[in-house]
Amino acid sequence: MDIDGLFHSPEDRIAAFARAQVHLYRQDASLQDYFMRLQMDPFLGPPCSTDDRRRSRQLVNRAIRSADRVSRLNQRRRIKTDVLFCPIPYFERKTENQLLARTLLGLAQTDAKILCLLPGSAPSKAELISLLDASGRKGQVEFIDPAEASNLIELRMWMHLSQMRGRSDFEKVVSILEPHGLSPSREVEGGFEHIAHFVEAWEHLEPSVEFDVLVARCHWHALCSPVCRTARQRGKTIITFQQGVIGHTLDVPLTASKFVAFGDSSANFLAQANDRFFRACEMTAPKVDYVKGGSLFDTIIDLPNQFDSQTLLIVDVPGPQDDFYGVESQSQALIQLADRLLSSDLPSIRVVIRPHPFWTGMDFEACQRVARRYPNRCELSHPAWSLEDDLRRSSAVAGIFSGVLTVASACGLPTYFLQTEQGYTTGDLACFSPRQTLLPDAAFSEISRIMTHRQAYAEAREVALRNGCEYYAGGTNANLDAKFFERLLQIEAGHEPE
């Protein structure tokens, strides 16, 4: 797949991942289920040996025998529903849980009958039931855990089968990619088994489920991917939503018939990437209707002129330890930018460093050094502080490519995407160039200027708002109410909600 002009990474891992996607999808479209896991692999670890693959082939036969036994253990009751709703089966992020609730309630308000695939252990289940009950919609929604076993024997068999399937599919991926010099490392095999657990669960359930429309949070995520494939095979309407800033090629191939994007920028960019993918596979790309919905999970707030706060919010640091995007130099440049601003002749400026919500495994030493050097003017944002809290106390924002930046711009904060020579870029953010995408020296000069001149600050706000409106449809939050979903469920090809 030609990604020139779409993405650039100095590590070349995005290009390698794109090539792997094409080779795998050509051979077997169901291997898309594992793309999420493969994008975490650098294709640089020790490849699997011939003996490893021979052992895997022996496991395949055992997996087939296990599948026969499992299929005879339990026959589920048949379920007929209007809408099958498939969230992503992870619940660590508060904003994602809020989106799940808004989507489910909006769908229920259309009077549709809904089957929601939700793990029994999901912490949000009780809240969802209460929300539906309070809205008089509880009876419209049935929750089912696709991985729920009827007895201990079935549970053990499923676990065994998932393990065997994951290893078998890993073996298949290795055999396809190895001739192209892209053999994944053995380290990712455990992730294949994790994905296979969801695939097996759905394939055991799907013969008993009949639905008219599938609404899935994200077409490439663990449970969503095999569910979307079933819906395509049945010729059903499939509605999915943008996951975040489009940072590499994981979003292709797009398996939805209707895709709710943030705005024109992402819709046009993803359409181009999807077309390139299918051309590389020598296939015809299925038609996709792109619906521009606005911000889906992060909240765009109407912030006033915050020049007097004299605070720069920095995101996207510390850099990821597994640098898939090749942003290590840009992350270092952000820390250097903070240090340079704090040591300049701008005595009133403060810096707040906001790490990614997933703190685990991050190295904060570089950030902490800056905070220790300027204890009264630099701080690390605590996880207890929401994004909205940090935006409300900031005058401007700087980072690399986080969705925090796109939201901050739409909120009216002067926002800067730090670039380095030959550094990471994504065309999804092209609408923020050139005035908001800057090299380090230019970023230092621009931030110094807007922090000292009210008129310059006001002009920068206007630029941010204008570009934020281009990235998010109308510069607003997505309104996922009954009216939105009624139009979305009924629109004809080539049309979209007004």
Image (cartoon, grey):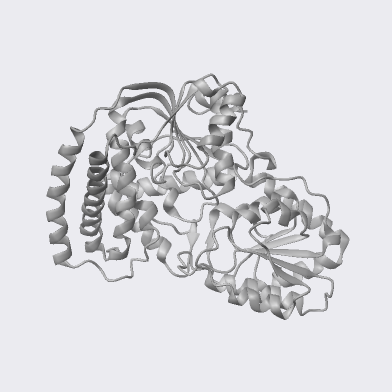
Quick one: which residue is furthest to the top in this view? 111
Q: Is residue 291 visible?
A: no
Image location of residue 141, percent across then percent down: 48, 25
Q: Quadrant of residue 47?
A: bottom left
Please state if 132 lies on the left or on the right of 178 as rendered.
right
Image location of residue 81, percent across then percent down: 41, 22
Please state if 1 lies on the left or on the right of 493 as rendered.
left
Q: Is residue 24 above or below residue 130?
A: below
Indicate the quadrant containing the C terminus: top left, top right, bottom left or bottom right.
top right
Image location of residue 290, percent across then percent down: 52, 36
Indicate the quadrant containing the N terminus: top left, top right, bottom left or bottom right.
bottom left
Q: Quadrant of residue 385?
A: bottom right
Q: Is residue 270 above or below residue 213?
A: below
404 or 272, which lies in front?
404
Residue at (27, 35) in percent of width and height: 204
Q: Quadrant of residue 445?
A: bottom right
